[in-house]
Image (cartoon, rainbow, N blue to C red):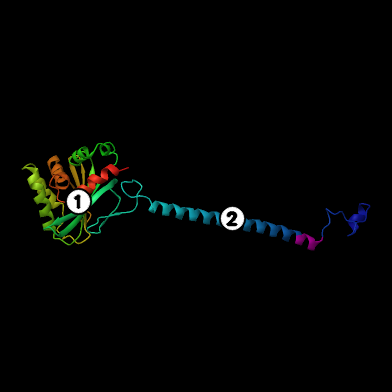
């Protein structure tokens, strides 16, 4: 009041300029309104954000479902395994960067299902061959210059000596007296541990090198063109040890993508 008198005008509550005068309670109310408005806006943004996240999460789940439903035969994107029909053993779609093209079972004595075997081929190396018919595919299967992995999964327990003896027995006549010292090298790549059901071995062939992964995960190699060609004849030749596996591979290669 005193300050207003000094400026030559008396301002009261009723005539104080509207923009300058505001009671403490009004100021508090206005501040509360602004705070409430900001809070409401923030809540709306938060809800919208949750909605967006929820939508994204649902979209992600939908995509996964679509992937699971995709065809698995010969597709680079496939994620589901393939079941070998006579043993029920599952083979993943990819192994060492190669695509599964077929699988089968090794039968001994006409009824003993010893192990399941699957072949994985390099899709780039087979891109031209797969279109050239069965004769060209058969020729490529016997050529170690076409990289592949042969994966063995035991269907029953077996002593390591019987396993290596069976492989050597199949290889030796096909090697025709050449590089026979490689047979002993192969035996030494296997530790003195008997194989149990589900044990896995991998033989990856690239040119004259066979990279071997034994049942306990140890890795070694054999360098011999004779050995590699003999091994390919064991699984893809006229007298293949698993005819069903060979047939499955011949059918699967043309379907590669």
Number of labelled discs?
A: 2
- Residue depicted at 15% across the width and 56% down the height: 107
**Observer able to see residue 27:** yes
Residue placed most toward the observer, 86 or 186: 86
Relative image position of residue 216 (x, y in whole percent): 21, 57
Residue placed most toward the observer, 123 or 17: 123
Locate the N terminus and report the quarter of the image it occupies. Answer: bottom right
Left or right of 68, for residue 38: right
Left or right of 79, for residue 243: left
Q: Quadrant of residue 142?
A: top left
Report helix, strand or loop for mark 2: helix
Q: Which residues are magenta?
A: 23-29
Left or right of 233, for residue 57: right
Question: Mark 1 and 2 residues: CB-CB less than 8 Å, in contact?
Answer: no
**Observer able to see residue 96:** no
Report helix, strand or loop for mark 1: helix
Relative image position of residue 182 (x, y in whole percent): 11, 46
- Residue depicted at 90% across the width and 55% down the height: 4
* Marked residue nearer the N-terminal end (1 or 2): 2
Graded by Cα atoms within 10 Å as few (under 14), some (14 to 19) or many (20 or more), the crowding at tag 1 reads some
Tell me the mark number nearer the camera, choosing from 1 and 2. Answer: 1
Q: Which mark is residue 244?
A: 1
Residue placed most toward the observer, 227 or 91: 91
- Residue depicted at 77% across the width and 59% down the height: 27
Residue placed most toward the observer, 21 or 248: 248
- Residue depicted at 38% across the width and 53% down the height: 68
- Residue 207 vertical placement versus 105 (above, below): above
Graded by Cα atoms within 10 Å as few (under 14), some (14 to 19) or many (20 or more), the crowding at tag 2 reads few
Relative image position of residue 208 (x, y in whole percent): 17, 40
Q: CA distance from mark 1 to mark 2?
A: 58 Å
Report which residue position mark 2 lands on.
48
Q: Which mark is residue 154?
A: none
């Amino acid at each position: 009041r005193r300050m207003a008198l000094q400026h030559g005008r008396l301002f009261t509550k009723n005539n104080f300029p509207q923009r300058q005068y505001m009671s403490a309670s009004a100021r508090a109310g206005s501040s509360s309104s602004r705070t409430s408005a900001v809070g409401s806006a923030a809540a709306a943004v938060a809800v919208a954000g949750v909605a967006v996240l929820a939508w994204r999460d649902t979209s992600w789940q939908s995509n996964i479902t679509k992937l699971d439903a995709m065809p698995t035969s010969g597709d680079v994107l496939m994620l589901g395994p393939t079941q070998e029909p006579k043993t029920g053993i599952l083979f993943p779609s990819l192994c060492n960067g190669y695509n599964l093209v077929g699988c089968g079972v090794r039968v001994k004595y006409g009824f003993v299902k010893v192990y399941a075997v699957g072949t994985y081929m390099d899709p780039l190396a087979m891109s031209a061959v797969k279109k050239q018919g069965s004769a060209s595919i058969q020729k490529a299967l016997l050529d170690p210059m076409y990289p592949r992995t042969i994966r063995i999964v035991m269907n029953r327990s077996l002593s390591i000596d019987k396993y290596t003896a069976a492989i050597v027995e199949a290889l030796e006549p096909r090697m025709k007296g050449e590089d026979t010292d490689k047979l002993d090298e192969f035996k030494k790549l296997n530790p003195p541990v008997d194989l149990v059901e589900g044990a896995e071995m991998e033989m990856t062939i690239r040119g004259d090198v066979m990279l071997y992964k034994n049942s306990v995960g140890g890795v070694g190699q054999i360098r011999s063109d004779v050995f590699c060609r003999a091994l390919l004849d064991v699984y893809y030749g006229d007298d293949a040890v698993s005819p069903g596996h060979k047939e499955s591979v011949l059918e699967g290669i043309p379907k590669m993508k």
